[in-house]
Amino acid sequence: HARIVSTLDKRKDVVCDLMCGIGPFAIPAAKNGCRVYANDLNPESYKWLRTNVKLNKVEDKVSCFNEDARAFLRRLTRDLLDKKQPLFTVVTMNLPATAI
């Protein structure tokens, strides 16, 4: 995670983390200054993601979601375009180790 976070430009990168779990990538990216849209389908992961965002004081940088990744990506893109906000520049999908 640290290697990827170190490549982000806090002035222009907006991160969309589709399968963020409890935030091992989303929170360091936010602490690095990036705007982050963090999503996980698992309600328990989502609960701990919100807790970790608060504990790490990055509520102003991270928006948390609990949706199917495909539906989330479609909705987020539509919402950002409708609001004329910048689209994400980085997309991550942090798969669990058992997915390989």
Image (cartoon, rainbow, N blue to C red):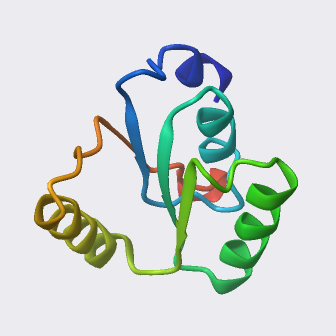
Q: In the rendered image, which quarter is residue 72 located in? A: bottom left
Residue 48 x %, y %:
78, 70
Residue 51 x %, y %:
81, 67
What residue is rendered at 39% in x and 79% in y? 68
Q: Where is 44 relative to 10, above or below? A: below
What residue is rendered at 27% in x and 66% in y? 76
Q: In the rendered image, which quarter is residue 77 located in? A: bottom left
- Could you say which is closer to the camera, residue 8 or residue 99? 8
Name the side, left or right, on which 55 lies relative to 91: right
Name the side, left or right, on which 89 lies relative to 93: left
Residue 59 x %, y %:
67, 56
Q: Where is 22 relative to 71, above or below? A: above
What residue is rendered at 59% in x and 34% in y? 29
What residue is rendered at 65% in x and 85% in y? 43
Q: In the rendered image, which quarter is residue 22 located in? A: bottom right
Q: Where is 79 relative to 9, above or below? A: below
